[in-house]
């Protein structure tokens, strides 16, 4: 999600990326509110002054992590939305994007869930987050128009139910209350998709999980 360093990056971009990646590790390990800017600088192996050259505060560091991560999520979800696959497969693709992120980068997911999604400041970020909800809603609404999904439920509410289930699974992994092995992740993807798509099936006999 946080874009990795490339050979084409400028030296300044390399340092900025180094700081962001270090901040993710520190926030995940110590928590945003209990860590210091110095902890991030030490983790990144840079001087405090250099960190302040790129970011005015640790709050700005966290905001940057949020914006870059969510931009990546929205772009990936939109790519899935634009395919011609059945709605069930597109929703399965969205589930994979969000849930498999845990296997790729659990520290980043921990920071996003614990310090951003569960933050009292979430209201200030809601416009950006709603872009992902809107893409899911469009997938469901299109399926309703095409007869893939039943049309007697709100596509908007269904999108919140779908995303909310995925978020709660991620929270369970962050808190250590759910198993998070590869088979557990695959089972979580399958379960959320089966329950939501089964409930949206026009033929209710197809709703069996």
Image (cartoon, rainbow, N blue to C red):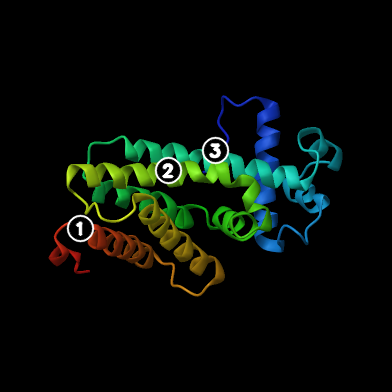
Per the image, the residue denoted by label 2 is 134
Pick out the residue farthest to the front. 152
Q: Secondary structure at mark 1?
A: loop
Query: N-terminal of the two: label 2 or label 1?
Result: 2
Q: Residues within 10 Å of mark 1 (few under 14, many from 20)?
A: some
Residue 73 seen in render: no
- Residue at horizontal 30 percent and vertical 52 percent from the top: 92
Residue 25: quadrant of the picture: bottom right
Q: Secondary structure at mark 3?
A: loop
- Work out whether residue 119 or residue 16 is closer to the camera in this orientation and state it: 119
Q: Is residue 153 left or right of residue 162?
A: left
Q: Which mark is residue 3?
A: 3
Q: Residues within 10 Å of mark 3 (few under 14, many from 20)?
A: few
Where residue 176 appears, as percent x and y from the top left, is: 53, 72
Per the image, the residue denoted by label 1 is 201
Q: Which mark is residue 8?
A: none
How far is mark 1 from mark 3, CA to CA? Answer: 37 Å
Can you tell which of label 2 and label 3 is closer to the viewer? 2
- Residue at horizontal 65 percent and vertical 37 percent from the top: 17
- Residue at horizontal 85 percent and vertical 42 percent from the top: 48
Q: Residues within 10 Å of mark 2 (few under 14, many from 20)?
A: some
- Work out whether residue 178 or residue 196 is closer to the camera in this orientation and state it: 196
């Amino acid at each position: 999600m946080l874009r990795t360093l490339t050979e084409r990056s400028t030296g300044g971009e390399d340092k900025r990326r180094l700081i962001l990646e270090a901040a993710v590790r520190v926030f995940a390990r110590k928590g945003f509110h209990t860590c210091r800017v110095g902890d991030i600088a030490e983790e990144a192996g840079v001087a405090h002054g250099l960190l302040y050259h790129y970011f005015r505060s640790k709050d700005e560091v966290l905001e940057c992590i949020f914006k870059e991560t969510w931009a990546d999520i929205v772009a990936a979800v939109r790519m899935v939305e634009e395919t011609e696959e059945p709605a069930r497969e597109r929703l399965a693709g969205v589930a994979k994007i969000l849930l498999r992120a845990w296997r790729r980068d659990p520290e980043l997911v921990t920071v996003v869930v614990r310090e951003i999604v569960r933050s009292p400041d979430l209201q200030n970020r809601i416009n950006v987050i709603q872009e992902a909800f809107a893409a899911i809603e469009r997938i469901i609404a299109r399926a309703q128009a095409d007869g893939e999904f039943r049309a007697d439920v709100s596509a908007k509410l269904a999108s919140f139910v779908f995303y909310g289930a995925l978020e709660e699974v991620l929270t369970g992994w962050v808190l250590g209350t759910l198993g998070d092995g590869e088979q557990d992740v695959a089972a979580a993807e399958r379960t959320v998709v089966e329950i939501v798509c089964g409930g949206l099936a026009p033929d209710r006999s197809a709703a069996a999980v």
